Image (spheres, rainbow, N blue to C red):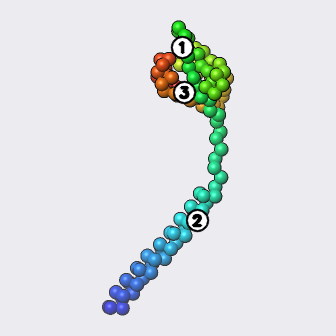
Amino acid sequence: MLTFIIGTILGFVLGWYVLRVLINYKMKLILDNIANAPLPEKDYKRIDLDFMKKEHMIYCYNRDGDVFLASGTTKEEIMTVLSKKFPGTRFMARPDNLKEVGLKGIE
């Protein structure tokens, strides 16, 4: 009976140790694959926007070069023009500039 109890305890401890070794080995392989994987490239362009409001029209400019991009009276009009001119492009604007011209946000 004593042999059975000692054998069970030894088997449990040895099994636990082997399981830990195998899990550590597998995690090392996974982490090596992640570390050596190439970084995904961005598949979109980004344009930073700046808005100006004159009377009822809102004019949209590229913040980097002050190049005129679009104009409209609503956010939807401006986004329609921008999405037609620049497909696959994300547009970014500063929140304070959006509030200044009366736009709540551009998605």
Is residue 77 visible in the rendered image? The answer is no
Is disc 2 placed on a helix, strand or loop? Answer: helix
Mark 1 and mark 3: Cα distance apart in space: 14 Å
Q: Foreground residue, 14 or 96?
A: 96
Which badge, 1 or 3, is on the more N-terminal residue?
1
- The residue furthest left is 1
Circles 1 and 3: CB atoms closer than 8 Å: no
Q: Earlier in the sequence, mark 2 or mark 3?
A: 2
| Residue at 52% over, 27% down | 94
Q: Secondary structure at mark 3?
A: strand
Type of amino acid at the residue the image marks with label 3 = Ala
Q: Which is nearer the eye, 7 or 86? A: 86
Q: How many neighbours does mark 3 have within 10 angstroms: few (below 14), some (14-19), or many (20 or more)? A: some
| Rendering coords of residue 88 (x, y %) | 64, 31
Q: Which mark is residue 29?
A: 2
Q: Which residue is mark 1?
A: 53
Q: Position of residue 21 (x, y in %)?
A: 50, 74
Q: Nearer the viewer, mark 2 or mark 3?
A: 3
Q: Is residue 101 visible?
A: yes
User: Amino acid type of disc 1?
Assistant: Lys
Query: Is 9 situated left or right of 101 in this image?
Result: left
Lateral position of residue 55 relative to residue 81, left or right: left
Corner quadrant of residue 2: bottom left
Q: Is the residue 32 above or below the residue 57 in the image? A: below
Which residue lies under the disc numbered 3?
93
The picture quadrant where one finds residue 68 is: top right
Q: Which mark is residue 43?
A: none
Which residue is outermost to the top?
55
Q: Quadrant of the N terminus?
A: bottom left
Asked if residue 31 lies left or right of residue 67, the reply is left
Which residue does the image show at 62% across and 29% down from the upper left?
Answer: 47
